[in-house]
Image (cartoon, rainbow, N blue to C red):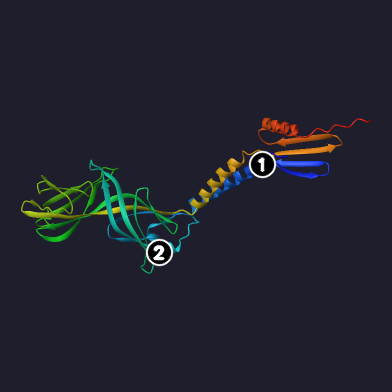
Amino acid sequence: MGAEYEVFVKGPSLYAFKGLAGRFAPIGVHLAMLLIMAGGTLSAAGSFRGSVTVPQGLNFVVGDVLDPTGFLSTPTEVFNTEVHVNKFYMDYYDSGQVSQFHTDLSLFNLDGKEVMRKTISVNDPLRFGGITIYQTDWSFSALQILKDDEGPFNLAMAPLRVNGDKKLFGTFLPDGDANSSNVKGISMLARDLQSIVLYDQEGKFVGVRRPNSRLPIDINGTKIVIEDAIGSTGLDLKTDPGVPIVYAGFGALMLTTCISYLSHSQVWALQDGTSVTIGGKTNRAKAEFQDEINHLLDQVPEIVESSPS
């Protein structure tokens, strides 16, 4: 019969069809939508989420950070994984603004064996055992200094302003008796990890130093060297068991939607002597189906009764 039809003949009867997948594809579309809904429900009721800010060089346990989102949330063995922040650093534009920040992370199992190591950044997370760790923020943890060639000392940096990208951190180094009611000292301010601004006991600007430059600065007889700027990485963690189901549902939805545009066409024919009765139906493209049937009929040979001699 041609035209990709499946043909069945029994005696004088004929049945042919094509595009059977197009007939059942709408059912697949609805099943795919149910799959997406099921995945979304599992994500809402069975996930874990949490965030943490960790200074460079310190550790945290995954399970201590994550909180359940619903009654289906079930911890797994990977929650015992310990995460160590090997290094935190930032990239800068030529203007001095922060362009990107990175965290070198190591993951250790209960036996203390490193099972994974990766440097993450914004839009480049770490994935392990169903847990995803995102780089989302940063902070200034401590300033490491030498005072009169003694130290190093770690001075905790306090956030003075953290709105948006315009962050400001500061610390204070007492000069003299720290327990005095009128204590004075050296103030140090920073917007990022690349430069430190110093002020003397009277609040006057003294200079700017870069960490690791080892360039000393003298402030009213006190020699200060900025050894290092220790950053803290801001991480978001989550487990979402519904994501694979949602992705599978969307994939099935796109596939079945395309298949549903295929026409399911059927043709019946019955021969009675020299006459043939033909009928057909389709669920789509009815005008094209009529043209297709006419084309097929044009290919059927004509039977002519022989006249008696």
Which callout, 2 or 1, points to the residue nearer the camera? Answer: 1
User: Residue 180 is drawn in which quadrant?
Assistant: bottom left
Q: Nearer the viewer, residue 102 or 16?
A: 16
Report the amino acid beneath label 2: Asn
Residue 227: x %, y % from top left: 17, 56
* Residue 19 image label: 1
Q: Earlier in the sequence, mark 2 or mark 1?
A: 1
**Residue 7 drawn above or below residue 300:** below
Seen in the image, is 16 located left or right of residue 154?
Answer: right
Residue 116: x %, y % from top left: 37, 61
Seen in the image, is 148 located left or right of residue 296?
Answer: left
Seen in the image, is 177 located left or right of residue 81?
Answer: left
User: Residue 148 is drawn in which quadrant?
Assistant: bottom left
Residue lying at 40% horizontally and 57% vertically, measured from the top left = 66
> For the residue labelled by badge 2, is the local secondary structure a helix, a strand or a loop?
helix
Report the amino acid beneath label 1: Gly
* Residue 168 image label: none
Q: Nearer the viewer, residue 11 or 148?
A: 11
Q: Nearer the viewer, residue 193 or 263?
A: 263
* Residue 80 image label: 2
Seen in the image, is 95 located left or right of residue 126?
Answer: left
**Residue 60 drawn above or below residue 204:** below
Which quadrant, please, contains the N terminus? top right
Residue lying at 68% horizontally and 32% vertically, measured from the top left = 286
User: Which residue is situated farthest in the front direction here?
Assistant: 309
